[in-house]
Amino acid sequence: SASGPTPRLLSEEPEWSDLTPIPQKEGVEPVVQILYDKEYSDAMGLLRAVMLKGELSARALHLTSLIIFMNSAHFTVWEFRRCVLGHLASRAKWMHELEFMQEINHMNTKNYQLWNHRRAVIQMLFPQPGQEQQQPRLAMDTLELYTLEDEFAYLAGVLAEDSKHYHCWAHRQWLVGAYERWRGEMDFTTGLLQSDVYNNSAWNHRFFVLSSGGVPLNGALFQHEVVFALNGLEDHRENESAWSFLTGLLFKLPHSFECHGDANGDGGGDGDGDGDEMQPLGVYGDGIEHGIDVMHLS
Amino acid sequence: LVMAESAVDLKKLRFFLTGALSCLPSHYANQEQNRLMLLYFVLGSKDLTNTLPEVEEEKKAIIDWVYSQQLIPDKDDSSLNDEFCGFRGSPFTGNPWNPECNPTNALKHDYSHITHTYTALAVLKMLGDDYSRVNREAVIRSVKRLQNENGSFNCLASGSESDMRFVYCAACICHLLNDWNGMDVELTANYIASCQNYDGAMGQAPGQESNGGGTYCAIASLQLMGKLDEIPDRELLLHWLMDRQISGFQGRPNKVADTCYSWWIGASLQILGHFDLVSEDICRGFHFQCQANIGGFSKVPGVHPDVLHTYFSLAAL
């Protein structure tokens, strides 16, 4: 900058005067060196000193924030940040991570470390069913609320901007399974597929929900889904995602489909599991047979 | 700016790679902890174009730098870190310059990363090193420790995401060291099989959307393990792979082509014995649209080239 004094490096600030930054040792002829800023190497020098000392303090947390802003993919810095957070054991600080991650997300949303951290934060804030005993005790130093519904809404927001965001879908899939929040996921994918019937990620998530046992699968639902897939192909005969979904329904469901005469969706069949007949696929109407014929032709 | 050519511009590529081997511009700043992997991409590219360093001193300098990233058991109390061994991505934890891998004390928060253990071994092999300085036992023990109960692998002993990428790294490490004690092979094969989705391909973890990278890592791992016959539905997988070519290759249905998928998908087909299903000329055409004016390849036409897409483009071509 042309005017004004040059800002001091972090290591030159009084609050850091007790530590000497530790340099990287590259030897005489380093390879694939990266030409990054002095501010970054200075901050990392301080972090190395902090890590060597084993200091898990508020200022260490702040230092990781600064470094992550400069390099959001640094897995060791994120991991050290979680160590510090774990040690400080404050719910307020873990809640603040939601805001911190949002800021990092603005800079780069396709980041494994960010989404891995997000999972760790959610696990801290919400004990998983059956794992409440293993949950570390946090100082309850905040009244701020954040619910799982808020988390689902956040993910919906990310997908509204990028409907095929791989990390986000993986996180949502984990959230649904870990917290048994299956209801609403089918409708969620329906909405996305209405906007873009070619969204393979949405089709995949729908199949995941159906095949994981979270939603009870019966004859009525099966028929509904087959028709849904066929609708996805109407006017879009080349839609590979819908084809895969259809063949998945027919051939890849974990429990081969025991429709037990419930084709009309009226809860038919005597429910005792024996003597119920497997219905031929043609029972579900011309739709499927027509679809299958087209598939064989194409 | 791109050059619409019909061949790899080897002269410009050479400049691009020589530059990268020495230093990378500041927009790579978020890759400091992955420099070993970048080194692998650069040297791999050179290997594919027969331009690896030949001068002994140059090779030695690179080999020494790689060995200095090896994490070895603490000299006084090996139990402190003998399950965290392998290689780091760069000297970012402040580890001492130690190319001879002399005994040293462990540093806190210092862990190897499975990707860098793999790429270090690959780089050493490319340069003709005999692994004499590799602590094989510690590496294998540490890789084994990264395997989860479901058969997947983490990348860091301190905790990380677990997905198919690291399964592949583990398989490569076992293969390069010729020591399969680094994993429970049955468990790994079962994990991979459980990742085959309803559409025939694999995602990064069970149920996750099938994509080219995850699928390659799954297939290549099975091949290295000698378990290629354990793919539940090989036919459906072949169909999925074949359907990924749209000019170049896409990573998932209904997405744009990206040069690195020529490798992930092309190599998968090759491993399964069906490279004949690839339309080579059309794919080549796409790659040459992605060849940059300064040398190297980018992911799609019109953006900056990078070492990852350069390596995978060359590997595919």
Image (cartoon, rainbow, N blue to C red):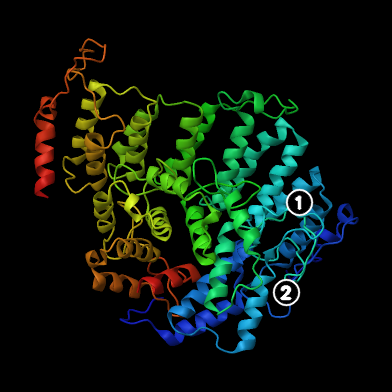
Is A172 left, or right, of B196 in this rendering?
A: right
The quarter in which the N terminus of chain A is drawn is bottom right
Name the residue beneath numbered marker 2.
Answer: B100
Local secondary structure at mark 1: helix
Q: Amino acid at mark 2?
A: Glu
* Position above or below: A107 against B29: above
Q: Residue at x 73, y 76 (%)?
A: A27
- Closer to the camera in the image, B73 or A251: B73
Q: Identify the image quadrant of residue A294.
A: top left
**Of residues A291 and A193, which is closer to you in this image?**
A291
Instruction: Using the image, determine if residue A163 lies above or below residue A145.
Output: below
Tell me which amino acid carries mark 1: Leu
Marked residue chain, label 1 = B
Determine the residue located farthest toward the bottom in the rendered image.
B55
Residue drawn at the location 41% of the way across and 43% of the way down: B208
Residue A16: x %, y % from top left: 86, 54
The residue that appears at 52% across and 75% down in the rendered structure is: B42
How far, Cα to Cα, is label 1 from label 2? Answer: 21 Å
Disc 2 crowd rating (10 Å Cα; few below 14, some 14-19, many 20+) is: few
Residue B80's label in the rendered image is 1
SS under mark 2: loop
The residue that appears at 66% across and 49% down in the rendered structure is A78
Q: Chain of mark 2?
A: B
Asked if marks 1 and 2 fall on the same chain, the answer is: yes
